[in-house]
Image: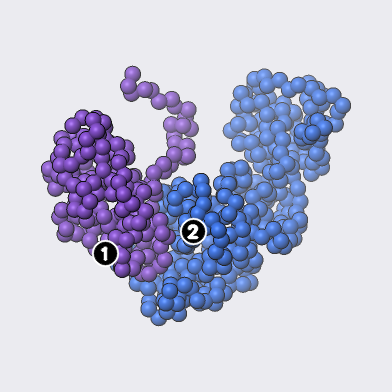
Amino acid sequence: MNGQPTVNATGRSGAIGLRFEDGTNSGTDMLTGAFFGVSIAEAHPIVPLPGTLFDAYLIAGARAPVDLLVDQASADAALRIEGMSTAKAIRKAHEDSGLTWDQLAKVFCVSRRSVHSWANGARMNATNAELLMQFVRLLDCIEDTSPDGRRSALLAVGDDGQNALDRFRMSQSQLRGAFSSLPRPEALLGVLHDDPNE
Amino acid sequence: VLGWLKGVFLPSTKVVRFERDKVDGRVCELLEAFRQGDLITGITEISVHTQQGPAMIETPLGVVVISQTCDLMRDNIPCVNVAERVQLSGGGAAHARKGSRPRYVHLPALGENDFADLSIAGAIDKSLIASLDRQPTVHSRDEIVKFGQAIGRNFSRFAFPDEISPYLAPFSDAILAKAGKLSTVQGRLIEKILQFRLQCLGSWDEPPFDLRLIVILEPTALPALPNNDDELPPFDEDLNSWLYDGDGKVKRTVQVIAEKLEAERDGAKLYWLWKAMADALIGLCKPQEGIADMTADVVSADEFRFTELDRSELLDLDYLSSPTTDRGRA
């Protein structure tokens, strides 16, 4: 299978698939390329996760790192915690992920105190509730269901220097385009980038 | 040369063209003594352009340098930006000193009622400025930094969508009604608030907006968090049921919560009382088309993340309050 995958959102459940330039859909094939700007390690077999065929993909081979390809446009992700309060869901995410409150807070780009207040019943915006659901889905995708195993999978650094947790954050609107308006030192110094392709 | 330059800025029937030549080195040397915030009393008019052509605004109290200090000495920047010095009185001056009127920047060395009005500003040729006397209006490092920040703040405020201002007006009015009134409990608590910031979870491009108000407190306003991953202090059940109803809506007024908050000495309860007060304040805002929701978060300044700073915008309450609110404007 050759070429860069493109997003192929399928259905209102927020499921996604990958369609390659040759027109084939990804399955248990070999996946190379990039998604949401996140490099996917070469020659890692991918396996569809439980649920719909193109729901999400786990890069297998080694147990970790895990790369989840999440559809940001998931409109009804809240259904994933149907019957569960936000407070209970955030506590469950905290316990199941093995992450600290501080690490979990980074998922939402909020302070540790904020995420802890949600866990104690404070109201959460619908957008963050949806993000929580996406994160729960991420946890569902990790084969090792122990908190330690999940934490290891989330925090293991891949070949690109990022871990799955960071990739998840970058794929979400919370960090998408972040700092784009911030004048960085190179801009303040008037530095012009050279073209790496030249 | 001076006379020729004055022709540009002083009443004249003839308008001359200003040549943006490189600034003479001797002028730059003279300007080394000048600083941002300097009062220049020798400039008594600033030019404006009208439909009828160039006109002049009188600045009898002089003008204040708002250009950055380092730019004053650069020979490739031909002009110095200045703003009119004005005097405000009463509540208007008090709010301006507090910073709730971004248009006005306080000039502490001149007195309580002296400000630079950034809405009346102009460009003055450097050689003219260099020939005039200067009088510093800011002295300490704190005053100098505040002055510079106030200028940046005025010109870089985020343009919130039209829906935001009327929606937040009751909140802004409630804050501004108590801000600076240190004889009141709310006034004293507001003193501990460093900033209100507003985050739109999603895009500001089009409604509905899912909003998150971030209340940033002085570092000492909340007890320090444990360094490890211990569970944070839980929400005391009695306090929870006293503050919120079964639907999670705050059921006490801002004043009642403020009184309890100020009297509270249990560090574990302080956060929840601050949170409830923020919830009560945003509860004053009425549902409005274009606003999906708004929640409030309280955070200590030393816990506030840089990512949150990037994703949120500073709220200038002066521009969000009801236009009919009388706050003693000059």
- For disc 2, the chain is B
On screen, residue B316 versus residue A35, left or right, reads right
Q: Which residue is mark 2?
A: B292
Q: Which chain is blue?
A: B
Q: Residue B178: x percent and y percent?
A: 63, 67
Task: Return the residue found at the far right.
Answer: B13
Q: Amino acid at mark 1?
A: Lys
- Which residue is found at the position 57% from the left and 55% from the top? B164
| Image quadrant assignment for residue B29 | top right
Q: Residues within 10 Å of mark 2 (few under 14, many from 20)?
A: some
Q: In the picture, which quadrant includes the N terminus of chain A?
A: top left
| Residue A33 visible in the shown view | no
Q: Position of residue B102 (x, y in %)?
A: 64, 50
Residue under the point 68% across and 21% down: B20
User: Of residues B185 and A160, which is closer to you in this image?
Assistant: A160
Q: In the visual, does B114 lie left or right of A126?
A: right
Q: Which mark is residue A92?
A: 1
Query: What hue represents chain A?
Result: purple
In this view, the mark in front (1 or 2): 2
Q: Amino acid at mark 2?
A: Ala
x, y percentage for residue A152?
19, 52
